[in-house]
């Protein structure tokens, strides 16, 4: 009887102090992607994707501040629908994917509610680490047809690519990169 009372008291204390465990999720690489957009010579937009990503996250709708994400994007999976251009973008003065085949993001905090907020964390591209803020929106969550539970988010960030060692000149409007991350994650069993 004492054990049950102690366990119930500890659980209640954890819930009251916000220390309840968030659910762990695995990022579903088949339904997640990173898209980027950069101005080309001031006359058009270059849009592309990174097609391979992986990672984990923790999510608790009732305590979103306890959420976390750790994701890896294969820079070698760059795809702008043009192989020659993909080769140019993979070069040393751009994303340098031969030396740095992965980019990562590891969150350090979240401010917001269960529907939207800002994730802070360390973004590493081209071997350069920077603290960034990513605006996020929860797209939805729920049971899937295969007995799993899924949650989806969209995140947006704009940064100056020179901060990450990408200094090739594609025109004065080309320094800014807009990136959208779409993640669908499956609750770990």
Image (tube, grey):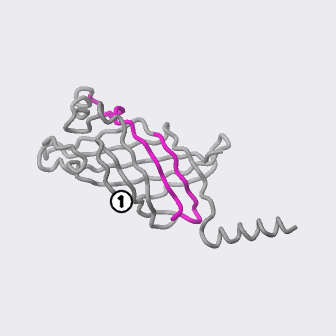
| Residue where numbered disc 1 is placed | 133
Q: Is residue 147 one of those drawn in magenta?
A: no
Label 1 SS: strand
- Relative placement, left or right, of 100 versus 169 is right
Residue shown at 14%/45% (left/top)? 43
Residue 162 in the image: state x and y as whole percent: 20, 48
Q: Nearer the viewer, residue 126 or 3?
A: 3
Point out the image quarter for the N terminus: bottom right
Q: Is residue 15 left or right of residue 163?
A: right
**Residue 94 rendering spot, x and y as whole percentages:** 22, 39
- For the point 46% across and 42% down, which residue is it? 32
Q: Nearer the viewer, residue 95 or 85?
A: 95
- Side (left or right) of 63 relative to 35: right
As rendered, which of 108 and 43 lies closer to the eye? 108
x, y percent for residue 66: 53, 62
Q: Tell me which segment is drawn in magenta.
A: 54-82
Give the farthest residue toward the right: 1
Q: Is residue 132 above or below residue 71?
A: below
Q: Residue at x 26, y 53 (%)?
A: 159
**Nearest to the observer: residue 149 or residue 60:** 60
């Amino acid at each position: 009887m004492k054990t049950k009372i102690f366990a119930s008291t500890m659980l209640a204390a954890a819930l009251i102090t916000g220390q309840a465990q968030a659910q762990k999720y695995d990022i579903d690489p088949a339904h997640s992607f990173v898209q980027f957009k950069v101005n080309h010579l001031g006359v058009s937009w270059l849009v592309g994707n990174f097609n391979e990503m992986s990672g984990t996250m923790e999510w608790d709708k009732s305590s979103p501040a306890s959420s976390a994400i750790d994701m890896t994007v294969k820079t070698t999976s760059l795809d702008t629908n043009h192989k020659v251009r993909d080769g140019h973008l993979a070069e040393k003065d751009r994303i340098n994917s031969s030396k740095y085949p992965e980019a990562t993001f590891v969150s350090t905090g979240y401010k917001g509610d269960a529907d939207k907020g800002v994730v802070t964390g360390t973004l590493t591209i081209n071997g350069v680490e920077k603290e960034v803020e990513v605006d996020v929106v929860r797209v939805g969550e729920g049971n899937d047809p295969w007995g799993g539970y899924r949650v989806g988010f969209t995140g947006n960030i704009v940064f100056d690519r020179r901060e990450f060692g990408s200094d090739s000149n594609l025109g004065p409007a080309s320094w800014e990169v807009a990136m959208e991350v779409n993640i669908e994650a499956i609750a770990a069993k």
